[in-house]
């Protein structure tokens, strides 16, 4: 019996290899998750910056209504009041900020010759403050909302896994700096 226990050299080698492979695969999955999270956060921040720009570009339309009453971007014409708002050009701001290349119906970011991510399906919705609301305590403020579709190919899985796809919702609200 002593001889069996003493002559076991190398029997732990397969177990050590299995543990090392398990740690490597787990760490690769964690690093891939972190990479996708960083890309999504960066894109969300860039789109939010562009949406904030749209909200501030509407300042000249919104401020007179806020100053003289409790309403948003409205303009008086001979036929009555009409909304006066603009959605801006968000894609051009994103192209400049993120270094995107337009392709067909989407915009792509490349790292060398490899696709890093693609953006498509941008929808922008401007929610104007109501015109002369009856309840001044629950006024909906001038809000710019956007949703963009993000598609990121995975580097984990050697091309056998589908890319990560997500719709990123972003919102910016115009608030006057000094209010009553």
Image (cartoon, grey):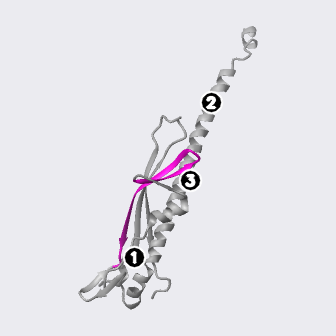
The answer to which of marks 2 and 1 sits earlier in the sequence is 2
For the image shown, how many numbered marks are present on the structure? 3
Figure check: 103 above or below 163? below
Q: Which quadrant is the N terminus positioned in?
A: top right
Question: Residue, x 54% and y 49% (percent of image)?
Answer: 110
Disc 2 marks which residue?
A: 21
Tell me the distance, in whole angstroms, between the alpha carbons under discs 1 and 3.
30 Å
- Circle 1 residues within 10 Å: few <14, some 14–19, many ≥20: many
Residues rendered magenta in the picture:
105-129
Q: Is the Cβ of the residue at disc 1 closer than 8 Å to that at disc 3?
A: no
Can the viewer see residue 45?
no
**38 relative to 157, above or below:** below
- Kindly indicate the quadrant of the structure image that contains residue 136: bottom left
Residue 81: percent from left, percent from top = 28, 85
Magenta residue check for 50: no
* Image quarter of residue 72: bottom left
Task: Give the spatial CA distance, label 3 vs label 2.
Answer: 26 Å
Q: Name the residue beneath numbered marker 3.
A: 38
State the CA–CA distance, disc 2 to disc 1. 54 Å
Residue 5, percent from left and from top: 73, 13
Question: Where does residue 93 sit, x and y in percent of width and height?
Answer: 50, 65
In the picture, which quadrant includes the C terminus? bottom left
- Asked whether 108 falls inside the magenta stretch, the response is yes
- Tag in front: 3 or 2: 3
**Mark 1, residue position:** 142
Magenta part, dominant SS: strand
């Amino acid at each position: 019996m002593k001889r069996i226990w003493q002559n076991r050299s190398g029997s732990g080698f397969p177990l050590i290899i299995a543990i090392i492979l398990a740690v490597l695969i787990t760490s690769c999955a964690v690093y891939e998750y972190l990479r996708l999270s960083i890309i999504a956060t960066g894109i969300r921040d860039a789109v939010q910056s562009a949406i904030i720009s749209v909200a501030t570009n509407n300042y000249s339309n919104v401020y007179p209504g806020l100053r003289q009453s409790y309403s948003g971007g409205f303009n008086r014409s001979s036929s009555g009041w009409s909304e006066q708002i603009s959605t801006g050009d968000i894609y051009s701001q994103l192209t400049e900020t993120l270094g995107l290349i337009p392709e067909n119906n989407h915009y792509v970011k490349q790292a060398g010759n490899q696709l890093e991510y693609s953006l498509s399906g941008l929808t922008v919705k401007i929610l104007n403050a109501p015109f002369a609301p009856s309840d001044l305590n629950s006024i909906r403020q001038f809000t710019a909302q956007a949703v963009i579709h993000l598609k990121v190919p995975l580097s984990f899985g050697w091309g056998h896994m589908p890319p990560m796809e997500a719709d990123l919702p972003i919102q910016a609200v115009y608030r006057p700096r000094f209010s009553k």
